[in-house]
Image: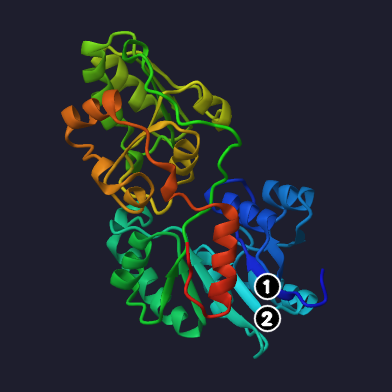
Amino acid sequence: MPETARRALWLVPVAPLGGVARHVLDATAAGVPGWHITVLCPEGALAARLRAQGTTVIAARFGPEAGLGASRRALAAAVRASDPQIVHSHLAYADIVSAWTRLPRTARRFTTEHGIARDDGVYHRSSAQAGAMALVHRQRFRRFDGAIAVSEATRAAMIEKWRVRRSIVVIPNGVALPDGLAVREPADVAGLRILALSRLSAEKRIDRLIEAYALVRREHPAATLTVAGEGPLRDELEARAAELGVPVAFPGFVDSEGAMADADVVAQLSVWENCSYTLLDAVARGLRVVASRVGGNGDIVGRDRCVDPDDLAATAAALVSAPPAPRDRLTTPGDMTAAIARAYAGEEPEC
């Protein structure tokens, strides 16, 4: 670590690889200019990947599975070991642990919000739970010195639901543009290959995608749909495809890179997305994208290119004819981390 580098401790309460893990991996691989990042997280796939790329990791009992007491003790120990100027939490559990753990007066608290939705049903089991969590977040923000949101829609939801009064900096997730990759020309519609990379759960609205695909098949019977992922609605979705008489492949978890290489269109009709890596990767690879008009999707593909999944005819038409989304909207990992460094310094981001 350069002697002039300042120190930030990132709190990540998840072990498996997912959207937030991807954000942390990309950010630490690119590096936050002027800062040495240490990551506190549970032992698991994320910790292993971080070590493999040379990131400093403190693996400890931290997160929901460890419990609040163990997580607070892990944070206190990590602060003693790393002596950070900034403690930067990711996801609500880490935010709460950070807010209610005593830190040195020299340490500033930052948070990045990855997962808030306008619809309380996306992340909460009941309105009572949503209300209680909103109150907790309002209280904990009094202890934070800086806040980052991954999209303008995320920022707006934070203000609306949590009544955040402090400044919130918007820094989108970064995605690398593959070298030498040109935007793909539209494929032969007759053999259109549609791909969804998604959890098989209600908020992802895969049922609407299957219904729109059935309309596509009426005009283009060789078109295919692959829904890659797992979740509680698998049997129900397979039954819906059979009821409509359309072949839908459900291969479970797949390598997303390979799946996108064999697709023409990526569809994502979720009830809410903050800054979807699936959409970012699809746009970066020159794929056509059909996304619901919610959350941060419009920031990635353009608001006028998004669809209402309840309008099956319009969704089916978009699956067939939507042009590739422009890549000039994308933020690179280097742009993202440079913006984080400016946020740490109290400056406005340029990405």
Residue 218, relative to residue 92: is it above or below? above
Q: x, y percentage for residue 306?
A: 27, 42
- Can residue 70 be spotted in the picture? no
Q: What residue type is labelled 1?
A: Ala
Residue 110, relative to residue 60: is it above or below? below
Helix or strand or loop: what does disc 2 sit on? Answer: loop
Could you tell me how far apart the alpha carbons at marks 1 and 2 are, in whole angstroms? 6 Å
In the rendered structure, are the residues bearing label 1 and label 2 in contact, judged by CB atoms less than 8 Å apart? Answer: yes
Residue annotated with mark 1: 8
Q: Quadrant of residue 161?
A: bottom left
Q: x, y percentage for residue 32?
A: 65, 65
User: How many marks do you count on the picture?
Assistant: 2
- Can residue 91 be spotted in the picture? yes
| x 69%, y 63%: residue | 39
Between 133 and 318, the one lying in front of the other is 318
Residue annotated with mark 2: 85
The N terminus, quarter of image: bottom right
Counting other residues with Cα less than 10 Å from the Cα at mark 1, is it few (<14), some (14-19), or many (20 or more)? many
| x 36%, y 71%: residue | 134
Q: What residue type is labelled 2?
A: Gln
Between 214 and 148, the one lying in front of the other is 148
Judge from the rendering whether residue 276 lies leftward or rightward of residue 259; answer left or right: left
